[in-house]
């Protein structure tokens, strides 16, 4: 990978880091609100759960971006963290913070999928 390409990835990752760091700072939506109305309580609880999920996802993405920046600094960017093969340029262009090549990512995803239940097999 050329220095120009690496610089481009560093710029993209830096912008994403800033974006997601700012996004997770806004925590007003997770404040616990009290209300005498049961429907309002349910609505606030649902909105809070959705916001917590969003914060969790963005925090995880921020960690991946910071790890990718660390790999850039260590001259390991673009190498799969599992098999040490080069990650395809198309994959890096789509998801520059990815730590895995497509083959290792698919294997990891398959391990995380829930197994079919006995009822589904019948």
Image (cartoon, grey):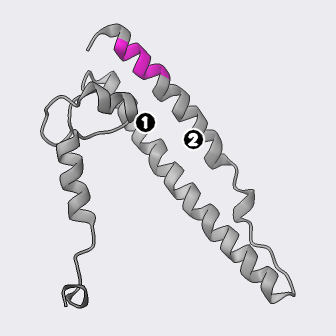
N-terminal of the pair, mark 2 or mark 1, is 2
Q: Are marks 2 and 1 in contact (CB under 8 Å)?
A: no
Residue ID at (27%, 67%): 113
Q: How many marks?
A: 2
Camera sees residue 96: no
| Element at label 2 | helix
Q: Is residue 80 left or right of residue 25?
A: left
Camera sees residue 92: yes
Res 82 quadrant in image: top left
The residue indicated by pointer 2 is: 20
The image position of residue 89, as x and y in percent, is 28, 25
Residue ID at (20%, 36%): 80
Res 23 quadrant in image: top right
Residue ID at (43%, 44%): 63
Residue ID at (22%, 42%): 102
Quadrant of the snapshot with the N terminus: top left
Q: Is residue 94 left or right of residue 121?
A: right
Res 64 quadrant in image: top left
The image position of residue 39, as x and y in percent, is 79, 85
The residue indicated by pointer 1 is: 66
Label 2: how many residues lie within 10 Å, few (<14), some (14-19) or many (20+)? some
Q: Is residue 95 left or right of residue 38?
A: left
Q: Is residue 93 left or right of residue 57?
A: left
Q: Please check the rendered image and state whether residue 98 is part of the magenta-colored stretch, yes or no.
A: no
- Marks 2/1: CA–CA distance: 11 Å
Tell me which segment is drawn in magenta. Answer: 5-11
Quadrant of the snapshot with the C terminus: bottom left
The image position of residue 88, as x and y in percent, is 23, 29
Say if 58 sits above or below 44 in the image. Answer: above
The image position of residue 72, as x and y in percent, is 33, 24
What label does residue 32 carry, if any? none
């Amino acid at each position: 990978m050329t220095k120009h390409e690496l610089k481009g990835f560093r710029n993209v990752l830096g912008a994403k880091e800033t974006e997601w760091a700012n996004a997770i700072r806004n925590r007003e939506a997770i404040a616990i609100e009290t209300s005498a109305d049961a429907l309002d309580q349910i609505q606030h609880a649902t909105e809070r759960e959705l916001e917590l999920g969003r914060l969790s996802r963005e925090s995880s993405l921020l960690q991946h971006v910071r790890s990718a920046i660390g790999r850039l600094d260590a001259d390991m960017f673009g190498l799969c963290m599992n098999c040490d093969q080069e990650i395809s340029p198309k994959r890096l262009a789509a998801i520059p913070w990815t730590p895995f090549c497509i083959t290792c990512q698919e294997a990891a995803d398959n391990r995380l999928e829930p197994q079919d239940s006995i009822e589904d097999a019948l």
